[in-house]
Image: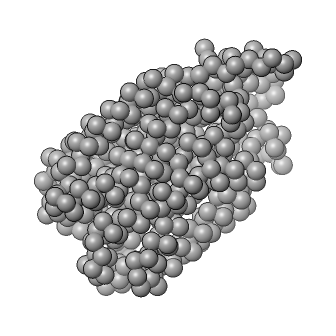
Amino acid sequence: MKRTPFFYGWVIVGVSGLTVFFRNAAATLTIAVFVFPMAEDTGWTRTAIVGAASVAGVVSMFVSPLAGWVLQRFGPRVLLAGSMLVLGGAMMSIRWVDNIVMFYVLFGIGRVIFSSPVQIGSATVVAQWFVARRGRATSALGVMHSLGMGFFPLFAQVLMNASDGDWRMAWFWIGISVWAVALPPTLIALIRSPESVGLNPDGETDDAVSAGGKSATSAASEVQWTVREAMRTPAMWMLAVAGGLVFFIHTGVNIHQAAFLRDQGISASVAASALSVMAAGTALGSVMWGWLLERLPGRTVYALTAGWLGAVALLFLLVDSAPVAFVVAAAFGVGIGGLLVVPPVVMADYFGRRSLGAIRGITEPFVSGGQAVGGIAAGLIFDLSDSYSGTFPMFTVAALIGVALIILARRPIRPIRATAGATVAETAGAK
């Protein structure tokens, strides 16, 4: 490979960032803009519409291990380019749905792509290219996702306004945008790892790697776990369950937020704008939490992220005007920024790069399950009580349980193998 004048890992971050930007075509914030007009036009209930995301979350629980295997076996180019191809086709095809089953299939496909392949593939390939700078590199992914969060709800609303409220055409052009912008770079520029092209993580020189790297978190000192070894640790399972709980909160709030704001007497345009304000908060949070990851233990930062989400969830009970909606949405967005950055970095720091794709494939079903239950639980509470007020204390309780699990999930010590291949590096990560 011809060397670039800068570390090629930043190209990997940029291309992976495009996939997380465009995965928002099937985000809960995007469908949140469609819930009201689709319910009015089709007669489907809000619970039925958002149920597509919940069903997809259940399916993602089974797709995630497959996505992890594809990533480990064929690399990020196959996984992420294939994801963009399928995502664009599914979103544009929603234009022609004539029953809710078709909508469940098409949006569900897009949501599965959002929840599993892109989630696993983008963060894992970045973790392959960065170790010492993993926090800031992953935070860049969080910023790209945040930009997509802000862009797609407004993009969808603009498309609907331009077509006299036609939500079908809005879905069509969303799908076309995925194909036109995100697909080509993933086919051309993604590379599995720096070692596969004669480079080192973080752009370190060979001399620096031989000397032990720049820091205790450098590639030379990172402990590499196998899948079986990781599965034997309580830490992996506690982090997995905690991930499900925090994403239960994330999806439950996101998917119903626009409808909740409309119920509070806030206009459609202002509700969509609040989602964009939340996305701006997510961008800020991605940078903030990424900065903290390089200065504090990952477990501490993860616990702070979960606690932040639980505290801010209660603030939605105070929303009664556009200014308050903007403030609360921004604060919640800061917490979401942590979810985009912190969990994948902690998992990589705990278990290393070698089998990370497969390990993420095993833990990600918990995230997908949390996303599935969060949306449908909030919808059922609304349908039964004609109010969302009961949902927010529920989210706070989930956050407190998540904080407890994260605190208990101490960084594991990899057992020394009884072979000549065992090295001091195998225990370095436990310090």
Q: Is residue 127 above or below residue 70?
A: above
Q: Quadrant of residue 27?
A: bottom left
Q: Is residue 62 shown left or right of residue 211?
A: left
For the point 53% across and 52% down, the residue is 61
Name, please, the residue furthest toward the right.
420
Q: Is residue 112 above or below residue 280?
A: below
Q: Quadrant of residue 215?
A: top right
**Image x and y of residue 9, in percent:** 68, 43
Q: Is residue 16 visible?
A: no
**Image x and y of residue 218, in percent:** 67, 25
Q: Quadrant of the C terminus?
A: top right
For the point 35% across and 33% down, the residue is 401
**Image x and y of residue 360, in percent:** 60, 43
**Image x and y of residue 379, in percent:** 28, 59
Q: Can residue 393 be seen in this view?
A: yes
For the point 35% across and 65% down, the residue is 50
Judging depth in this view, the residue of 139 and 117 nearest the camera is 117
Q: In this view, does 180 lie above or below 336?
A: below
Q: In which quarter of the image is residue 220?
A: top right
Q: In this view, does 232 lie above or below 265?
A: above
For the point 53% across and 34% down, the residue is 237
